[in-house]
Amino acid sequence: MSDDFSVRSCDLNKLNSMTKYPSIPTYHALGDRGVLLDKFVSFNGEVILTEKVDGTNSRIIILPDGNYVLGSREELLFAKGDLIGNPALGIVEALHSVADLLPQSEHNIIVVYLELYGGKVTAASKQYTAQQSIGWRLFDVAVITDITMLFTKSVQQLASWRDNGGQTFLDEDQLKKASIDFGFELTPRLATVEALPVSIEETYEFLKQMLPKTLLALDEGAGGRGEGIVARTFSRSTIAKIRFEDYERHTKRRQ
């Protein structure tokens, strides 16, 4: 446990900025009015395909002083020991008891990224549940070092650092181990492929073949429609999302 860090005295705005999840680019670039462009993200080597969950991005920030903080995509909601937490999106209610059981970090900030889905989380919740059941899946873990140096930066500098790849994410094997250590199931692994389709039309067909329905239905009454796929290299150095919504909108507008 670090003697130099305290969540009660640190700048929470900076902690929030450095631990937000960076935006994942679309596999094909988005043009005007949602039309897809031929430009695409280039992958080198094997590509791991996982189901993209239409839920709410949630953070468990494990701190080197023995505490943790829960957050949504944009804001911090709750710290260990708080009597009152922000109820936004049901994140605190769903995850605070789970976070209490996670292993501590001695020197670094570890950020566990979960997709919370079902319930009344998003408009797509009915695709996962007819009974307002709640589920969550682990999709990434970041390890943030050089904490003292990072806290000397402004919130704006931290946002630029984050959006330009400053965070260090676990590779696929490390992520699988973390899922066991933390007791979280990973987002479903669909396949590992040597290459992705290049054209927009071929990619849309590929998406329909790879994810005909969600693998994350929580009960029999779920609608069953999946959101799409996240493609990533083993090291996670390259990552992109392939969503039904984007390709359906593109196809409709082209017609």
Image (tube, rainbow, N blue to C red):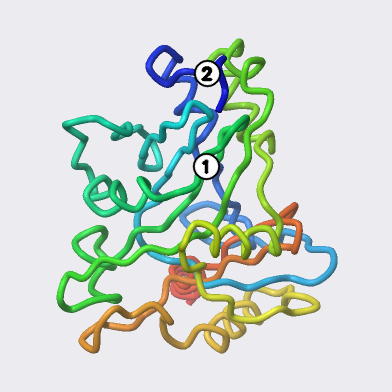
Residue annotated with mark 1: 111
The residue sitting at 57% across, 71% down in the picture is 50
Q: Is residue 81 left or right of residue 12?
A: left
Helix, strand or loop under label 2: loop
- Residue kind at label 1, given as amino acid type: Val
Q: Position of residue 84 (x, y in %)?
A: 17, 32
Closer to the camera, 94 or 203?
94
Which mark identifies residue 234? none
Q: Residues within 10 Å of mark 2 (few under 14, many from 20)?
A: some
User: Which class describes the residues within 10 Å of circle 1: few (<14), some (14-19), or many (20+)?
Assistant: many
Q: Residue at x 37, y 47 (%)?
A: 99
Quadrant position of residue 59: top left
Q: Nearer the viewer, mark 2 or mark 1?
A: 2
Q: Is residue 24 above or below residue 107?
A: below
Q: What's under tag 2, amino acid-wise?
A: Phe
* Mark earlier in primary sequence (2, 1): 2
Report the residue marked by disc 2: 5
Residue situated in front as seen by the camera: 197 or 164: 164
Q: Position of residue 91 (x, y in %)?
A: 28, 48
Residue at the extreme right of the image, as rendered: 45
On the question of residue 250 being in view, the answer is: no
Q: Residue at x 43, y 82 (%)?
A: 215
Please provide percent x and percent y for residue 93.
Answer: 22, 49
Q: Nearer the viewer, residue 35 or 119?
A: 119
| Label 1 SS | strand
| Depicted 155 relative to depicted 97: above or below | above
Task: Give the vertical position of 114 relative to 176 (above or below).
Answer: above
Rounded to the nearest angstrom, the CA distance separating label 2 from label 1 is 16 Å
